[in-house]
Image: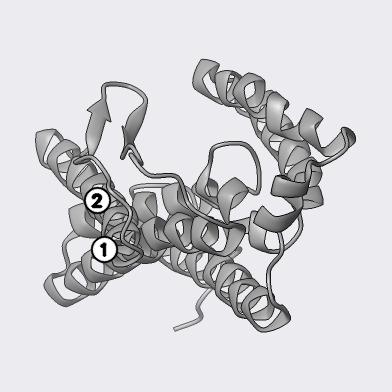
Amino acid sequence: MVFGWQFAVGFVLLMFVHECGHLIIAQRFGLKVSAPVFIPFMGAFILLKDQPRNAWMEACVGIGGPIFGGLGALVCHMLGQALDAPLLIALSSTGYFLNLFNLLPVGFLDGGRIVTALSRWLWLPGLALLVWFGWTHPNLIVWIMVILSLPRVFSLFRPRTGEEERYFEVPTVQRWTMSILYFGLIAILALGQYVAHNELADRGFVPHTRHHQPVVQ
């Protein structure tokens, strides 16, 4: 409403960049994937025609989207600063937030796929965070995500088959690598969103998230 159709175009392009991250990493693993599919009011996704062969592969495909999406938001942020363009800074702030939200470790969100290489039990705090977000920011789509996440969470409490045991076997080096990438990306996106939000606040577009001290001339 503030920035008009230009923001909408940029928003869709940022989603496209995010999905291209999934697509490129999946293709690097030799997986067949569809082109990005956009669903109005919901978002976008790619369909994996071949399923990942193990949790490491699933995690790599999962984190590819937020990495590319975060880079897309960073480009918008840098251009917005260089050109003093609030529209681009607003896009970067939204891009940081959406990729950060996608890293919640639950269900079919990217975070839920990434933590299969760390610990599936992270789905429990992820579900709690998603429920909290849905409660504090009422939104039908969030509650649909909660419902769709339940089957994976319930699977934690049933015995795993031999095939599932092999699927979730991840070497220690790979587990640590994905942990650093995952939690490092969360920290970077959170910092980027905080900085971009306050730059918008300095320009009068949103409330500040920090308290300013009065300046004495």
Q: Name the image quarter holding the N terminus.
A: top left
Q: Residue at x 71, y 25 (%)?
A: 150
Whether pointer 2 and pointer 1 mark residues with C-beta atoms closer than 8 Å, the reply is yes
Q: Which mark is residue 14?
A: 2
Q: Position of residue 113 (x, y in %)?
A: 57, 50
| Marked residue nearer the N-terminal end (2 or 1) | 2
Name which residue type carries label 2: Leu
Q: Which mark is residue 29?
A: none
**Relative to the observer, which residue lies in front, 142 or 197?**
142
Q: Quadrant of residue 106?
A: top right
Q: Position of residue 74 (x, y in %)?
A: 30, 69
Query: Distance between the Cα atoms at labels 2 and 1?
Result: 6 Å
Name which residue type carries label 1: Gly
- The residue to which callout 1 is attached is 72
**Relative to the observer, which residue lies in front, 90 or 101?**
101
**Relative to the observer, which residue lies in front, 103 or 48?**
48
Q: Is residue 12 above or below residue 100?
A: above
Q: Name the image quarter holding the C terminus.
A: bottom left
In the structure shown, which secondary structural element does the residue marked by tag 2 occupy?
A: helix
Q: Which residue, as the protein is rendered here, is positioned at the far front?
A: 162
In the rendered view, does 128 fall on the left or right side of 142?
Answer: right
Q: Is residue 127 above or below residue 90?
A: above
